[in-house]
Image (cartoon, rainbow, N blue to C red):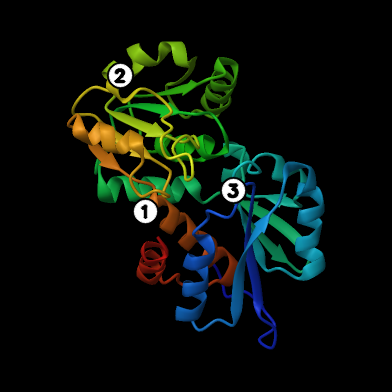
Amino acid sequence: MTEQKKTNPSLPVLLGVMGDPIAHSKSPAMHNAALQAAGVNGMYMPLHVRPEQLESAIRGIVALGYRGVNVTIPHKEQVMQYLDVIDESARLIGAVNTIVNEEGKLTGYNTDGIGYVRSLKEEAVPELAGKRIAVLGAGGAARGVIYALALEKPEQISILNRTADRAVALASDLRAHGLGDITGSGMEEAAAILASADIVINTTAAGMHPHVDDVPVDPALIRAGAAVSDLIYNPLETRLLRESRERGCTVHGGLGMFIYQGAVAFEHWLGIPAPVETMRRAVLESF
């Protein structure tokens, strides 16, 4: 547990989430419920920040006295250049999703992978060691998830991405840190890789509200009996998960990851235990 943070009790704690788009986010509902349950005078707001506005928005955190923010698509990698300190694990991952403001000093963390693996093990696949894992996408969310997955000692992690070079580069970066057998490929290799994968994980935005009919890959390529996981939590069951379930796969949605990564962020900001079940109820009620 992080130590109790110093805040001015006479002023509300300002928190938020930066992204583009951001209107779909359930983070405000979750964190405002958490603040209330914890008895903290504060508010958490959605902040629509376009890529060209990111540097100004980060300066605004300090100017406006925000305690911290979450960072979501598409800013998780680019935001790093505007921070004062990057946590070691976030540096290895190459992406930040949580920023803490300590009297003008901005520190970046990544809570995505921790939250994801806890959720996957509790809700779908209790043992990850020795598994063959296929990850769809090579962006900021993929980096955090793959880093945390690699610590569980799977047999292999294969990254599939529309731009093969990006998948190859990400795999190379993570292998350089001794994280095991990680390879990168373009989507033309999807059929062969998915046919032998024990776990398939979507880290892309394909299928996220409002584009709920999109899929990152043809579900028919995934072998029956595999576990299929999607980081998306809005909708709770994406088309990828629905069609995979109909083919006999174990499915796992993004709600648990979303809640647990939020809980870790909450503890970074405030130094008190996050009310996890309150956060879960708030997200479910917001749909």
Q: Which of marks 2 and 3 is in front?
A: 2
Q: Which residue in the protein does label 1 denote?
A: 256
Of the two numbered discs 2 and 1 on the same chain, state the one appearing first in sequence.
2
Q: Position of residue 25 (x, y in %)?
A: 53, 55
Count the numbered circles shown.
3
* Viewer-nearest residue: 151 or 71: 71
Q: Kindly identify the residue that appears in the image at 38 percent across and 39 percent down.
A: 230
Q: Which mark is residue 72?
A: 3
Q: Kindly identify the residue that appears in the image at 53 percent across and 53 percent down.
A: 24
The answer to whether residue 110 is left or right of residue 286 is right
Question: Label 2 sits on what residue type?
Answer: Leu
- Identify the element where label 1 is drawn: helix
- Identify the element where label 3 is drawn: loop
Q: How far apart are marks 2 and 3 (CA)?
A: 29 Å
Q: Which mark is residue 245?
A: none
- Identify the element where label 2 is drawn: helix
* Viewer-nearest residue: 39 or 89: 39
Near mark 3 (Cα within 10 A), the count class, few <14, some 14-19 or many ≥20, is: many
160 lies above or below 58: above
Residue furthest toward the bottom?
Answer: 10
> In the rendered structure, are the residues bearing label 2 and label 3 in contact, judged by CB atoms less than 8 Å apart?
no
Q: Which of marks 2 and 1 is in front?
A: 2
* Viewer-nearest residue: 249 or 142: 249
Q: Which residue in the protein does label 2 denote?
A: 221
Q: Distance between the residues labelled 2 and 1?
A: 26 Å
Q: Kindly identify the residue that appears in the image at 30 percent across and 43 percent down.
A: 252
167 lies above or below 79: above
Q: Is residue 272 visible?
A: no
Near mark 2 (Cα within 10 A), the count class, few <14, some 14-19 or many ≥20, is: some
Q: Can residue 201 be seen in this view?
A: yes
Question: Label 1 sits on what residue type?
Answer: Gly
